Image (cartoon, helix red, strand yellow):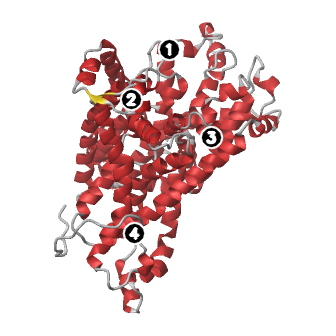
Amino acid sequence: MAVTHVETPETPVAPHAGPPAAGRRGPALPVRLLPYLLIAPTVLGTAYLLVYPLIRNLVISFQKFGIAQLIRGGADFVGFDNYRQILSDRMFWSVVLRTFVFTAINVTLIMVLATLVALLIGALGKGMRLAVMGGLVVAWAIPVIAATTVFQWLFQSQLGVVNWVLVALGFEQFDGYAWFANGTSTFAIIVVLIVWQSVPFAALTLYAAMTTVPKELHESAQIDGAGGVKTFTLITFPILRPMFGLIFCLEVIWVFKCFVQIWAISQGGPGNATLTLPVYAYQVAQSLNRYDLGAAISMVTVLILAVALLAYFRQMFKEEGEL
Amino acid sequence: MRTSLGRKLSLNTLALIVFAFSVFPVYWMVLTAFKPTKDIQAETPSFFPTNITFAHFGTAVNADGFWLFWRNSALVAVTAVLLSLVVACLAAYAVARMKWRGRQAFILMVFIAQMTPWEALLIPMYVIARDTDMLDKLTMLTLIYFMVTLPFTIVTLRGFLKAIPIELEEAAQVDGCNQFQAFRRIVFPLLAPGLLSTSLFGFITAWNEFAFANLLIIKNQDQRTLPVWLSSFSNTFGTDWGATMAAATLFMLPVLLIFLVLQGRVTAGVAAGAVKG
């Protein structure tokens, strides 16, 4: 953690906006100001494009902010009214519950499958290993919007290949089955899509981590009579626990805030079956023009995410040792 | 001997299943894009390319606005990445090569910025864009993508910079270069591969981004980007799945190429966790 600082007197924050012209840096400019000039564009960008929107969101969540205020400005502060309204709305709590269930299902599937795939890759011969890793990279690389489009085609009711395969396997009830008309099946498709897209990253990272575990440990465990499962629970997992922790936190964050897949496939429907917090906030703001309520829902989302983020950072700094 | 052969066989079968599940949706997309419409609508789908046609690609490319949206996407992504590369280079140099008060706080800020849940900032961005007359403008998207890619770029470049021995620069300075010249002549050439792979990842993030592009470009349809256009494929192509898949294939192509080029670096650079949009 400790980084020794060179003795610097009180240094003011970079007074200049815009990128510093490094080429013209003459001896006249105090050298100790240089780092602050170098980070100034980053700090300014972050202030305007990240901190300001976050603060603005917070402010809007304490105002009455509808379409009239959006156009004419002059929004009034209403204290905690928006929060009171959403927190006393049963719809909101059902969305919160659904978001947690959605996250739990996805993350469990992702972690289990990714671990199994990583172990599988490690056990394969060279040719097969490269083939599987190549396949995973292809699944990982496909842009989200391309993937959502393809999944809509795979699960299309009349011509979709999934229904054809299911009927060919003897499940006659899937002949012309409209997946996207039913809440549960739409939910399931989005889960499959997200798991399919997320496993490659987790599996490849876990595999890369597993290769760092000394082979001798495995061999001696096997000599002592430990099977594959025992070797994993007694050796691989304990050694790689921090890595599992990091990936777990990342997946929780990514799934919890997931917006694009849901919006592109179902917009939260049918019948709210796939409505999670980020989609709900967007919907309330855009469809109902209740930017104030949407902002309040976003703030709640950020607060919940902050817990996962804190866990992630704790884990990461323990790993890295220093910044 | 027998059990090990059986084990090998079952492992390879499992591997084939994993491989098939990973690539099938992509394979099916590309296959559909090349299939004649009558094959797409056939009772029994064919799983291998028998008749190949390029007609769907023609439909996709000639669809209203395809080239315009392609240009918009490329323009926004390239500008955002170049901007973030320049800004990140400066910051990463300050972090990796200099000692100054507030350095740790700055790094912490970058790490936190990297984990920003951008999905939660859609509403204020919309309000800000409206207030500053930036709705329906690619400039606003460019700025947002710049900020989305910036923290990751700083973190990665800092990693690459740290890997370059500082003695090289010091030697150059002993030989009479100033700090900037030492950077330009010694560090920059060594940093170039890192700059390239970092910017390609940034490009992918910006190229794929949907939520902000969908929200901030509303009235002026000429300013739309490819993902938004593709997501409304049913407006463009109706039930023409061949053309839809051709469009999706064309959209994915640059990303897939970049991934294949960078495959070696993919797993190395991801621990920071910013590759996934």
Q: Distance from label 4 to label 1 (Cα)?
A: 50 Å
Q: Residue A301: image x %, image y %? A: 31, 31
Looking at the rendered structure, the kind of residue marked 1 is Pro
Label 3 or label 2, whichever lies nearer to me, is 2
Q: Is residue A215 above or below residue B66?
A: below
The crowding category of the residue bearing disc 3, from other C-alpha atoms within 10 Å (few below 14, some 14 to 19, many at least 20), is many
Q: Distance from label 3 to label 1 (Cα)?
A: 26 Å
- Residue B161 — which label? 4
Give SS at disc 1: loop
Chain ID at mark 1: A
The residue that mark 1 highlights is A270
The residue that mark 2 highlights is A69
Please state if A71 lies on the left or on the right of B244 as rendered: left
Q: Residue A320: image x %, image y %? A: 27, 56
Give SS at disc 3: helix
The crowding category of the residue bearing disc 1, from other C-alpha atoms within 10 Å (few below 14, some 14 to 19, many at least 20), is some
Looking at the rendered structure, the kind of residue marked 4 is Leu
User: Which residue is rendered at x = 47% and y = 78% of the image?
Assistant: B184
